[in-house]
Image (tube, rainbow, N blue to C red):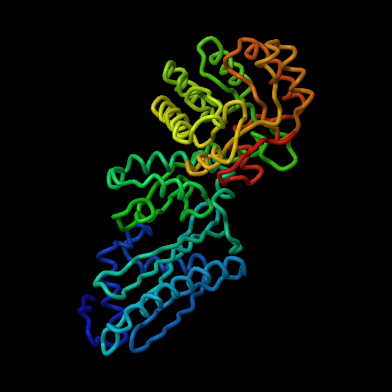
């Protein structure tokens, strides 16, 4: 039975005051938009951002709608905003239609869409939309959306914003995943499938940022079955990394490669590899085996502490195309857990052993929110075990954008690395992690990547 609303025959605009009082008390909107007074935030934001607002009011016997819309010059952003508002209206009207027998004669449903503008880092402005549906309950359903734009009202993707900080979608995704799994409110009811869906597309996240941190807002209903409201996740941004584009070769026109090391860590080789990378101020990606991390957790942590990226190379280096799906999942998850426990990093990159993939491997990676990373240059260090031969193969095949396959389990690879780094530096190459390399190519979704050859 529909519960009758307690504001029978309250007339316009009295119902607006009542709804807003209830909404502010129940949801605490002022807290997460950074001001205890929504009205104060909005008026101040308008002055700071020179944004004008249109207000649309629609009132019938069954419902009322109050919708505030910012006037945006950029047609692409304006369309995205209007599409979101239209979807909210359609959802609301469908709810009204479903309850039409219980509405009318003073019992009306209400839709209110408010927007607040908040100044952010690097001349960005975030438009924070709140949509409140009140149809057949005494508390409103709250939906929100954030659109972040630059000073010209051009929509700004999260991945575009992060690049000057030297951050990538993969590192932010890993941080977000770790914080959500440790969140005291939802961790016991966190739905892994929902979490993986959230993690897959960073550019769909609700976000805003200041000079010090990135703030992500995620509806609890998108992570659990029984929770409502919003989770706020803050990720620090390192100002010292501003300008890292030029230093690490992320500028268009410069040459960049990703060095990757498989099968480790191994005490006889990995420390030597780390030493060579440190001398050349180079970052790399280490695709570790879970079984090796279990044996040498402190060495795995040493790699992570040096600022390198950790990828998942499965637990026991089994050909994933020749095992059952349940075994495949176990190979990936066991390794991921070992890496996370040892390093604190949650790997979001998977390198399948032998480079063998099929549709089932791709499905498991995608459901895990991870990218499959292969290579475009095979150093053949595993075959030649000769430092000179390793250098010759790489120098002959490398191009800008290459992902280079090496192994930090062969001493001859450690022997070859100092000369290889020196030679590639003289040729103008910069050394990136795989995630940084993908960011230069605007590849952020879970997928399969080889690098350039």
Vertical side of 133 occupied by 235: above or below: above
Residue drawn where x is 51% and y is 65% of the image: 49
Give 29 or 99, whichever is nearer the viewer.
99
Q: Position of residue 440 (x, y in %)?
A: 65, 42
Q: How many marks?
A: 0
The N terminus, quarter of image = bottom left
* Location of residue 407 by image quarter: top right
Which residue appears at 26% of the width and 84% of the height? 107
The image position of residue 438, as x and y in percent, is 62, 40
* The C terminus: image quadrant: top right
The residue nearer to you, when weighing 41 against 424, is: 424
In terms of depth relative to the viewer, which is nearer, 363 or 64?
Answer: 363
With respect to residue 369, does 96 lie above or below?
A: below
- Horizontally, residue 363 falls left or right of residue 113, namely right
**106 lies left or right of 68:** left
Q: Residue at x 56, y 70 (%)?
A: 72
Horizontal and vertical percent position of residue 41: 39, 65
| Position above or below: 8 against 163 | below
What x and y, as percent, mark residue 21? 26, 72
Query: In the displayed image of the protein, which residue is found farthest to the right?
Result: 396
């Amino acid at each position: 039975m529909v519960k009758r609303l307690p504001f029978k025959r309250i007339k316009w605009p009295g119902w607006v005051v009542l709804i807003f009082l209830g909404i502010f008390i129940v949801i605490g909107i002022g807290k997460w938009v950074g001001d205890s007074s929504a009205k104060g935030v909005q008026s101040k934001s308008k002055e700071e951002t020179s944004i004008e607002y249109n207000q649309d009011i629609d009132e019938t016997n069954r419902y009322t709608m109050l919708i505030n819309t910012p006037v945006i010059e950029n047609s692409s952003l304006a369309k995205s905003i209007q599409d979101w508002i239209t979807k909210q209206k359609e959802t609301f009207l469908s709810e009204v239609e479903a309850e039409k027998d219980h509405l009318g004669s003073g019992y009306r449903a209400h839709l209110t869409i408010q927007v607040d503008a908040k100044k952010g880092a690097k001349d960005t402005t975030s438009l924070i939309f709140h949509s409140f549906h009140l149809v057949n309950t005494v508390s409103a359903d709250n939906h929100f959306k954030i659109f972040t734009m630059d000073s010209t009202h051009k929509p700004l993707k999260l991945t575009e914003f992060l690049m000057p900080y030297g951050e990538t979608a993969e590192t932010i995704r890993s941080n977000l995943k770790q914080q959500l799994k440790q969140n005291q409110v939802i961790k016991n009811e966190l739905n892994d499938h929902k979490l993986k869906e959230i993690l897959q597309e960073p550019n769909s996240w609700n976000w805003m940022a200041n000079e010090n941190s990135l703030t992500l807002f995620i509806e609890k209903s998108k992570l659990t079955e029984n929770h409502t409201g919003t989770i706020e996740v803050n990720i620090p941004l390192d100002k010292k990394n501003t300008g890292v584009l030029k230093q690490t070769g992320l500028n268009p026109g410069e040459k960049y490669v990703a060095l990757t090391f498989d099968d480790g860590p191994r005490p006889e080789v990995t420390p030597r590899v780390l030493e060579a990378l440190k001398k050349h101020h180079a970052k790399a990606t280490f695709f570790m085996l879970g079984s090796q991390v279990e044996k040498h957790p402190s060495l795995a942590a040493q790699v992570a502490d040096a600022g390198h990226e950790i990828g998942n190379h499965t637990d026991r280096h089994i050909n994933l195309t020749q095992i059952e799906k349940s075994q495949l999942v176990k190979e990936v998850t066991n390794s991921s857990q070992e890496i996370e426990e040892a390093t604190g990093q949650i790997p979001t990159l998977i390198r399948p052993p032998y480079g063998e993939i099929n549709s089932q491997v791709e499905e498991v990676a995608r459901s895990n929110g991870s990218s499959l990373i292969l290579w475009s240059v095979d150093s053949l260090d595993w075959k030649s075990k000769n430092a000179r031969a390793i250098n010759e193969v790489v120098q002959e095949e490398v191009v800008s954008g290459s992902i280079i396959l090496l192994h930090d389990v062969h001493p001859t690879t450690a022997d070859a690395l100092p000369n290889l780094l020196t030679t590639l530096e003289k040729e103008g190459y910069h050394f990136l992690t795989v995630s940084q390399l993908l960011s230069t190519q605007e590849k952020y979704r879970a997928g399969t990547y080889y690098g350039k050859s």
